[in-house]
Structures are given as structure tokens and as C-alpha cells.
Image: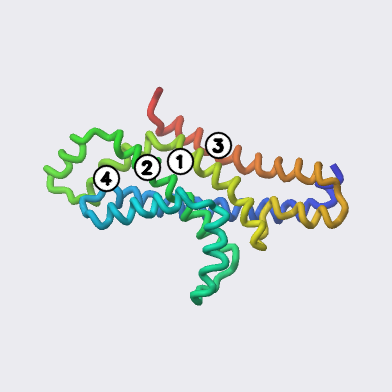
Amino acid sequence: MNVLTDNFSLYGEGLLGTVELTVFASLLALVVGVLMAAFRVAPVGSLRVFGTVWVMVLRNTPLTLLFFAVLLGLPRFGVVLPFKIFAILALGCYTSAFICEAVRSGINTVPVGQGEAARSLGMTFSQTLGEVVLPQAFRTVIPPVGSTLIALAKNSAIAGSFSVVELLGTYKTLNELGYSIIWTFVWIAVGYLIVTLTISALFNVLEKRWGVPR
């Protein structure tokens, strides 16, 4: 227990870093993921190709490699930002590919007649998608999106290897101070459990309120 009590501020800083990475990367992933899903069902061929390539490349690229590409590659092209911003970009873009596929599967559950009826009323593609299709698709994608964001929270641990303050990275300092590595990781695991259970509880509330009854 003294591992936690003696280093509460260190654990707190790491937990806060993980929460910040999770929240901001989740927002980025949701925005980009929904946009890519719209591209993949768009009537414009170039947009469909862009969305397909985005998903194929990111889903089949190891996250660690993507971190190297963003955190070490972008500065070579003159893009200099804090490492935390780079980590958010890597996490958010990577997760957006999975959000995209979850949203696209939800779009496919909406009856085709809904879109046809909207178009017959003179609605544009963006209006049909935003006002008719996505609100209905949202109800079916709550569970998979929640699972994806829980995975994002756990994936944020990779950021610690790139000098970004987050929960897993605290073990380095505690190990140097001579604390038990077992109890160090026990409390780190508790921290991640708090984050993931919070996300799970949030999406359970959303599912009970707006999800499709089963």
C-alpha cells in the first residue's frame, strides 16, 4: 500500500495524463471516424476510395509503428508539436479506422428505403446522412464504439515509451526508487481499470437510453 500512498501525486499525474490522452484522442477518433464512414458510403467515387484507403492502411498498421511515424517522422517535415499532441494524433487516427467501420456497419442496418424517401423529398446526401441515416445508425453502434474507445484507453500506454506522461510510464520512476515492481503494476492496473470502467458505465447508460432493445 505504501507504493500508492508514498507516490500518490505521481500516480495522479500519470492517471491524469492517461485520461487526457483518452478523452482527446476519443474525440478525434469519433469525428474522423464518422467522417470516413460518410466518405465510404458517399456517391462520389474519390471520397469512397479515400475512406477505403484510410481504413485499410490504419487498420493494418501496428500502432507502435504509427507512433514512430507521427512522433519521429512529422518533425522531419517541419511539424513540431508537443509529444502529447503527436500521441493524440496517432491514437485518434488509428482508432478512427475502427470507429469508421463500426459506424458504417450501423449505416448498413438502416433500411435503404429511408434514404430513398429522403432523396425523394429533395434532401441532399449530407442532409440525408446527417438527419435521417446517422441518427438511426447511432442507436446500433453504441456497444462497438464503446468497446473501441476502451481499447483506445488501454492503447494509450504506448505513449509512455515516447516521453508522454501517462499511467504506465510511472513504473520507470518507481522502479528507480526501489519499489516493488509487482505492487507498482497492481496500482497501475487499478488506474486503467478505473478509466475503462468509467467508459463502460458511460456507454451502458447511452445504450439503455438510446440503444436498440434486444
Quick one: SS at disc 2?
helix
Look at mark 4 in the image and give the residue it sits on. 131
- Distance (Cα) linking label 4 and label 1: 20 Å
Q: Residue at 27% across / 41% down in the picture?
A: 133
25 vs 156, left or right, is: left
Position in image of residue 92 (x %, y %): 49, 54
Amino acid type, callout 1: Val
Quadrant location of the N terminus in the rendered image: top right
- Judge whether 124 appears above or below 76 on screen: above
Which residue in the structure is indicated by mark 1? 145
Q: Residue at x 67, y 59 (%)?
A: 165
Amino acid bearing label 3: Ser
What mark, if any, has residue 103 been given in the picture? Answer: 2
Tag shown at residue 200: 3
- Mark 1 vs mark 3: which is more N-terminal? 1
Q: Quick one: label 1 or label 2, which is nearer the N terminus?
A: 2
| Quadrant location, the C terminus | top left
Which amino acid type is shown beneath numbered disc 4?
Glu
Give the crowd class for mark 1: few <14, some 14-19, many >=20 residues within 10 Å.
Answer: many
Image quadrant assignment for residue 108: top left
